[in-house]
Image (cartoon, rainbow, N blue to C red):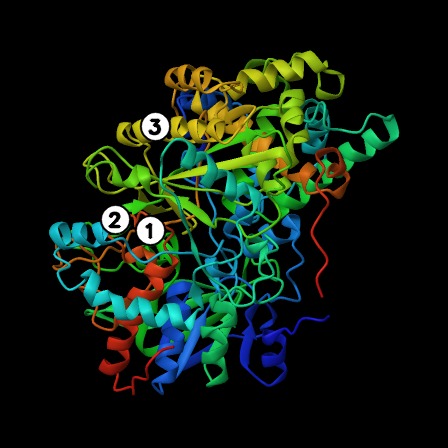
């Protein structure tokens, strides 16, 4: 049976999409609103503004790839669909960052986990950042409408074995776990969400909001890297961009200039602060690029008696928030437990060690179960996140110090995961750490993990959730933007993406971005005299 | 230039590494000449071809012909990956391979006394194990870069999949 490709069909119908890698001359564009980035924030903004009758231009650094291109091959997917081929790192190289880079942004490659912003996180934002209007009740209708729009619903198919083992292990030691809602319609349960959904079941921006906007005449520029906004007297007067080569790496001579009534940054929590830094945007309170959060994530692999086949079946369908709820939100750093998909390239890179040690563990690939713990950073006084800065060539880099509070959480997380894995029947457990040789019992693991030196580049730390850097606050002193994403110093500029979060979320962030963006974009549409239509 | 400095500053090795870097003006100038740092060069491939069989010891096929082909394909895979990286990463990797390639730094930093094609398995394994847990973070990051590039290149190849009982992606459409 052949699968329809709604993107290629749309292109054939005449969508206004320009691949800038093929542009032969400079381009100057005028529009009502230009949106930088096509991920969770850019997609939702484009749909709402275009539905309000506004003329919209979307600018994307990556390429336009769609289901016909998504062949479930890691070697193809990571260079095509991820920032820096999936090898983006923090400044000291201690943390690997997975971030999307194609039309749809990270929503094209995420693992579909959908959570509303936890009430405890919103309460912290109210008490510490003056975001009094972001209450659970006030946001509920926005989440509801986006859930309806993106098919976010309980996943009723039984979890794959990798996830079922998390549920069984947790139950054995008396820890509650729950099922994760997913943004899918007609999912085939294949397990390759991270390489682009080959069946268009995942309701990413690529197959929902962006096609809707393009259908209404919005324009999309791909392979276009925004260099700077021209900021004068508290207003943006223009946007300057470079065209990229076909591989999306090197800038070409041809330039693109966009003039708009309003400018929206949705380039993600590394990209959006970087555009503002390159633009010399006013930052009187030194908050731009600061408080950037990652949900620093650690990994534990377990060899089970029976096949797990962690590459097969929907990833991340079971979670436990037990270790987020045990202490106050600003107490010892808590963590969310999930079970990721396992594929040879990413798993081989993540497993520490080399030679026969590494090969022996890889031979157990089919019987391997893996857990990840996502640490909730940005609440404990010793967890203030990292800082986005610029290299000499203007490219962004995140310096993220792993502080004592984080390492304390890492140790507890490695212990929790090992305990759950042994309770689920693991023969051996291997925390992803260069000095952890593998443990044969929970007692051995407990003793071993207590003694592990927790240091950068010995402990494997990864992140798929970059947040903050253009934080929201109720006043200009504490944030870059207000609770509607409007820049405190620049009148016709908004930020709609995960960079506006003043802390991490404490859950996979896509739905938080969708909901907050729907709210901000609707207010923006009204302020630009658009006709706001309901979403969903 | 800054990227090189950042790479060198990133760890406690800055003093040593910068001192060594000062001895290498011609090689640095070679990178300065073009705006786009070169992808993997022939010298880099020689270094990699020696490291790959040690990093992948136990994972590569046993028969000599298949083994040679697997090493070659892995080195090619690293080359393709490096070609797709942004300039700053390519510059940093260029520095790493330069340090490994030049006899003085190969001996001092990697502890490998003979040229790579003649180095023993033990010498190369000793170098990798030493950098893997080195007290100097910069050298750990150098090891991690090699680990990541080589593991990614090998496990991207369908030739690696049967040994780990991975059936490959399912058929759709």
What residue sits right under mark 2 in the picture? A503
Which disc is residue A467 wearing?
Answer: 1
Task: Identify which residue is drawn at 17% across, 52% down.
Answer: A123
Task: State which mark lies toward you, 2 or 3.
Answer: 3
Residue B83 visible from this viewpoint: yes
Residue A391 visible from this viewpoint: no
Is residue B90 or residue A264 the one in the foreground? A264
Q: Secondary structure at mark 3?
A: helix
Residue A328: image quadrant is top left
The percent position of residue A137, horizontal first and vertical second, equals 20, 65
Distance Cα–Cα, label 2 vs label 3: 21 Å
- The tag earlier along the polypeptide, 2 or 3, is 3
Relative to A271, does residue B14 appear above or below in the rendering?
above
Do labels 2 and 1 touch, CB within 8 Å?
yes
The percent position of residue A136, horizontal first and vertical second, equals 21, 61
The percent position of residue A85, horizontal first and vertical second, equals 56, 48
Distance Cα–Cα, label 2 vs label 1: 7 Å
Task: Identify which residue is drawn at 33% across, 43% down.
Answer: A321
What residue sits right under mark 3 in the picture? A412
Distance Cα–Cα, label 3 vs label 1: 23 Å
Whether residue A132 sits left or right of residue A254 in the image: it is left
Whether residue A250 sits left or right of residue B159 in the image: it is left
Relative to B81, does residue B139 appear above or below in the rendering?
above
Q: Residues within 10 Å of mark 2 (few under 14, many from 20)?
A: many
The percent position of residue B132, horizontal first and vertical second, equals 53, 21
């Amino acid at each position: 049976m052949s699968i329809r490709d709604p993107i290629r069909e749309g292109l054939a119908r005449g969508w206004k999409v320009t691949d800038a890698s093929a542009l032969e001359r400079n381009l100057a564009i005028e529009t009502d609103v230009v949106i930088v980035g096509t991920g969770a924030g850019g997609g939702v903004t484009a749909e709402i503004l275009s539905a309000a009758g506004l003329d919209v231009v979307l600018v994307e650094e990556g390429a336009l790839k769609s289901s016909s291109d998504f062949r479930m091959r890691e070697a193809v997917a990571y260079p095509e669909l991820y920032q820096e081929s999936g090898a983006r790192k923090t400044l000291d190289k201690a943390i690997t960052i997975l971030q999307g880079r194609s039309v749809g942004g990270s929503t094209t490659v995420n693992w579909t986990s959908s959570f509303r912003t936890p009430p405890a996180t919103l309460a912290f934002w109210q008490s510490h950042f003056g975001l009094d209007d972001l209450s659970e009740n006030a946001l509920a209708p926005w989440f509801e409408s986006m859930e309806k729009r993106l098919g976010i619903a309980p996943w009723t198919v039984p979890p794959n074995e990798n996830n079922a083992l998390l549920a069984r292990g947790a139950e054995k030691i008396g820890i509650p776990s729950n099922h994760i809602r997913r943004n899918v319609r007609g999912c085939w349960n294949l397990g390759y969400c991270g390489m682009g959904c080959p069946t268009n079941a995942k309701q990413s921006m690529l197959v929902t909001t962006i096609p809707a906007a393009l259908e209404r005449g919005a324009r999309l520029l791909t392979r276009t890297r925004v260099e700077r906004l021209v900021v004068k007297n508290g207003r943006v007067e223009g946007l300057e961009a470079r065209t990229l080569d076909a591989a999306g790496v090197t800038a070409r001579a041809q330039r693109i200039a966009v003039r708009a009534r309003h400018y929206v940054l949705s380039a993600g929590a590394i990209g959006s602060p970087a555009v503002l830094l390159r633009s010399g945007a006013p930052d009187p309170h030194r908050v731009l690029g600061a408080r950037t959060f990652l949900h620093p994530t650690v990994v534990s692999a377990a060899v089970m008696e029976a096949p797990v086949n962690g590459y097969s079946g929907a990833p991340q369908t079971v979670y436990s928030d037990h270790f987020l709820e045990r202490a106050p939100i600003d107490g010892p750093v808590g963590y969310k437990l999930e079970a990721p998909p396992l594929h040879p390239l990413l798993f081989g890179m993540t497993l520490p060690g080399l030679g026969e040690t590494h090969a022996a563990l890889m031979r157990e690939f089919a019987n391997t179960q893996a857990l990840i713990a996502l640490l909730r950073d940005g609440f404990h006084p010793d967890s203030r996140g990292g800082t986005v800065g610029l290299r000499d060539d203007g490219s962004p880099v995140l310096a993220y110090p792993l502080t004592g509070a984080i390492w304390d959480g890492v140790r507890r997380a490695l212990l929790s995961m090992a305990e759950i894995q042994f309770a689920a029947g693991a023969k051996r457990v291997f925390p992803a750490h260069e000095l952890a040789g593998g443990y044969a019992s929970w007692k051995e693991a407990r003793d071993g993990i207590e003694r592990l030196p927790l240091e950068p580049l010995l402990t494997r730390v990864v992140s798929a959730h970059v947040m903050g850097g253009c934080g929201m606050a109720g006043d200009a002193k504490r944030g870059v933007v207000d609770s509607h994403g409007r820049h405190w110093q620049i009148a016709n500029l908004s930020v709609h993406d995960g960079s506006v979060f003043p802390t991490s979320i404490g859950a996979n962030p896509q739905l938080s971005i969708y909901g907050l963006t729907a709210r901000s974009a609707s207010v923006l549409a009204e302020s630009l005299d658009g006709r706001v239509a309901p979403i969903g | 230039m800054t990227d090189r400095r950042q790479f060198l500053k990133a760890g406690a090795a800055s003093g040593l590494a910068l001192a060594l870097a000062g001895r290498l003006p011609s090689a640095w100038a070679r990178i300065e000449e073009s705006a786009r740092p070169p992808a993997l060069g022939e010298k880099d491939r020689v270094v990699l071809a020696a490291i790959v069989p040690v990093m992948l010891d136990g994972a590569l096929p046993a028969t000599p012909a298949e083994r040679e082909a697997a090493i070659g394909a892995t080195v090619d895979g690293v080359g393709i990956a490096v070609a797709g990286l942004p300039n700053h990463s390519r510059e940093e990797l260029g520095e790493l391979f330069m340090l490994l390639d030049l006899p003085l730094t190969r001996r001092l930093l990697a502890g490998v006394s003979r040229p790579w094609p003649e180095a023993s398995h033990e010498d190369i394994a000793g170098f990798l194990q030493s950098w893997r847990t080195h007290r100097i973070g910069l050298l750990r990051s150098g090891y991690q870069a090699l680990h990541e590039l080589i593991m990614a290149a090998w496990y991207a190849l369908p030739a690696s999949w049967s040994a780990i009982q991975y059936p490959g992606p399912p058929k759709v459409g």
